[in-house]
Image (tube, rainbow, N blue to C red):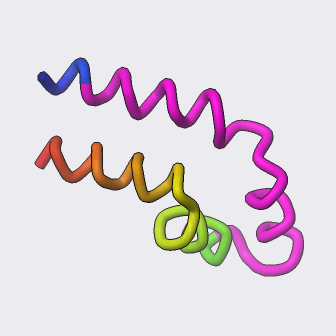
């Protein structure tokens, strides 16, 4: 189960997060922490990754 969940997280991150223009823009305008906060609280892909991560606990 954990392997399947980690695989899903990795797939989402590789497909959508690597090269994300919003992530790059947020890093330029703010800090790395603010970009991360945007990703995990406002981005639909980040929210999906977060929900999968919660399943690992």
**Position of 31 compared to 55: left or right?**
right
* Count of marks, rendered view: 0
| Quarter of the figure with residue 38 | bottom right
Camera-nearest residue between 52 and 24: 52
In the image, residue 27 sits, relative to residue 46, either above or below, namely below
- For the point 29% across and 52% down, which residue is it? 51
Residue placed furthest toward the front:
44
Question: Is 22 included in the stretch rendered in magenta?
Answer: yes
The x and y percentages for residue 26 are 78, 70
The x and y percentages for residue 56 are 16, 42
| Quarter of the figure with residue 33 | bottom right
The x and y percentages for residue 44 are 53, 57
Task: Name the magenta segment's main secondary structure.
Answer: helix
Q: Quadrant where the N terminus lies?
A: top left
In the image, residue 32 sits, relative to residue 11, either above or below, namely below
- For the point 76% across and 47% down, which residue is it? 20
In the image, residue 42 sits, relative to residue 56, either above or below, namely below
State which region is magenta. 5-32
**Position of 1 compared to 25: left or right?**
left
| Quarter of the figure with residue 34 | bottom right
Question: Is 43 included in the stretch rendered in magenta?
Answer: no
- For the point 55% across and 36% down, which residue is it? 13
- For the point 48% across and 72% down, which residue is it? 41
């Amino acid at each position: 189960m954990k392997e399947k969940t980690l695989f899903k997280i990795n797939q989402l991150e590789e497909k959508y997060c690597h090269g994300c223009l919003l992530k790059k823009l947020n890093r330029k305008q703010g800090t790395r922490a603010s970009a991360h906060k945007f990703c995990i609280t406002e981005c639909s892909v980040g929210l999906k990754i977060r929900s999968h991560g919660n399943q690992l606990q």
